Image (cartoon, rainbow, N blue to C red):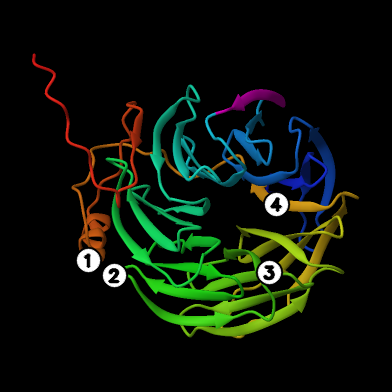
């Protein structure tokens, strides 16, 4: 049976492109489904859930597009500055990060901001939600990596790093995560919150994606995509994907193989077939799309996605070991409908004045 797949790409030209892909064993073809020109500046981030596609921009807005109704669904205007990062958790919540240092949690039911956290002193450069929905990681221009307990919207712990990191990602199983500093990928184990290995790309890294729990696809400021075995911290495969630098990568699993999708400044979106075996072979090209635009970001859309967040909250945790324990409990997070604005945790808290009541 053919898989239903959509591809969404943002561009410097302010437009988000939507394509419907016809899948086949040897060839995938794409038809233009929509162009969404809701921004007044370049598109900087994109994310897709089962129903919605969201795009963030340098115009400080997050634009919503309803994939079910094929209509513009309005805009979210909470951030003050470029939207740098967008990520859905299942169908129920969206997390956004921006140059204003805020990390916001949105309900997709009424599109209200449930929590607005002052996450970093500088910009939030990237965020990632743990597969359980209980934790989020963020990195920013204050040279910190922060772990957030999404139940109470508070910082679980802060790790100082030597440089400003610009990408952070959880692995699909949630037992490790990676942090990108310019051309370097640091691989962390959740249990110890320590670096277990590092790989260095020849050029600055622009995007990466876990294809499964052990293979990471890495793209940078050149035309090559490299695959890394995160357990061994080694490059295991590389191939020329585009004519100019690769700006974004995403992927999906189809039957017994993986499809890696790449987008480039050359205007092309390409779909690559990879068999994730022990001895990785160079991927084969399934299909390509010419947008004639300078692409900046990319997301794969599938109509069926992960489960919603539900049930009772887990306890607070302050160390990596405690966080690991929290995650092993068979619970899911419930994000309350209370709007919380938190000060930076590193600042001393002001004493409350006695109101005399």
Q: Seen from this angle, which residue lies furthest left?
A: 357
Is the C-beta separation of discs 1 and 4 under 8 Å? no
| Magenta span | 70-77
Which quadrant holds residue 245? bottom right
The numbered mark, 3 or 2, whose residue comes first in the sequence reads: 2
Is the C-beta separation of discs 2 and 1 under 8 Å? yes
In the rendered image, the vertical position of residue 71 relative to residue 236, given as above or below: above
Circle 2 packing at 10 Å, graded few (<14), some (14-19), many (20+), is some
- Numbered badge on residue 297: 4
Q: Tag 4, which secondary structure?
A: strand
Taking the image as shown, residue 194 lies to the left or right of residue 242, namely: left
* Residue toward you, 69 or 76: 76
Q: CA distance from mark 3 to mark 4?
A: 12 Å
The numbered mark, 3 or 1, whose residue comes first in the sequence reads: 3
Q: CA distance from mark 3 to mark 1?
A: 32 Å
Which residue does the image show at 68% across and 69% down from the upper left?
Answer: 219
Main SS of the magenta segment?
strand
Q: CA distance from mark 3 to mark 2?
A: 27 Å
Q: Which residue is mark 3?
A: 219
Q: Which residue is mark 1?
A: 321
């Amino acid at each position: 049976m053919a898989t239903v797949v959509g591809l969404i790409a943002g561009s410097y030209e302010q437009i988000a492109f939507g394509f419907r892909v016809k899948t086949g064993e040897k060839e995938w073809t794409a038809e233009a489904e929509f162009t969404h020109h809701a921004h007044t500046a370049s598109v900087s981030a994109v994310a897709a859930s089962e129903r919605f596609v969201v795009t963030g921009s340098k115009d400080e807005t997050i634009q919503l597009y309803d994939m079910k109704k094929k209509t513009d669904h309005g805009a979210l205007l909470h951030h003050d500055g470029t939207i740098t990062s967008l990520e859905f958790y299942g169908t129920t919540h969206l997390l956004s990060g921006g140059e204003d240092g805020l990390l916001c949690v949105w309900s997709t039911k009424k599109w209200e901001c449930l929590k607005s956290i002052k996450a970093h002193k500088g910009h939030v450069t990237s965020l990632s939600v743990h597969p359980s929905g209980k934790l989020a990681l963020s990195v920013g221009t204050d040279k910190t990596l922060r772990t957030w307990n999404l139940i109470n919207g508070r910082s679980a712990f802060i790790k100082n790093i030597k440089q400003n990191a610009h990408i952070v990602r959880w692995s699909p199983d949630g037992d490790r995560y990676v942090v990108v500093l310019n051309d370097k990928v640091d691989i962390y184990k959740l249990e110890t919150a320590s670096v277990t290995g590092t790989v260095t790309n020849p050029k600055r890294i622009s995007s990466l994606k876990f294809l499964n729990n052990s293979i990471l696809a890495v793209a940078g400021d050149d035309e090559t995509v490299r695959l890394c075995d995160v357990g061994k911290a080694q490059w295991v495969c590389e191939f020329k994907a585009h004519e100019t630098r690769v700006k974004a990568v995403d992927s999906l699993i189809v039957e017994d193989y993986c499809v890696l999708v790449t987008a480039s400044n050359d205007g092309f979106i390409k779909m690559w077939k990879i068999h994730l075996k022990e001895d990785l072979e160079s991927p084969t090209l399934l299909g390509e799309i010419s947008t004639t635009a300078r692409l900046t970001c990319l997301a794969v859309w599938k109509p069926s996605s992960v489960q919603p967040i539900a049930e009772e909250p887990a306890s607070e945790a302050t160390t990596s070991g405690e966080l690991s324990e929290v995650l092993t409990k068979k619970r899911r997070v419930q994000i309350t409908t209370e709007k919380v604005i938190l000060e930076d945790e590193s600042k001393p808290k002001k004493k409350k004045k006695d109101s005399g009541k």
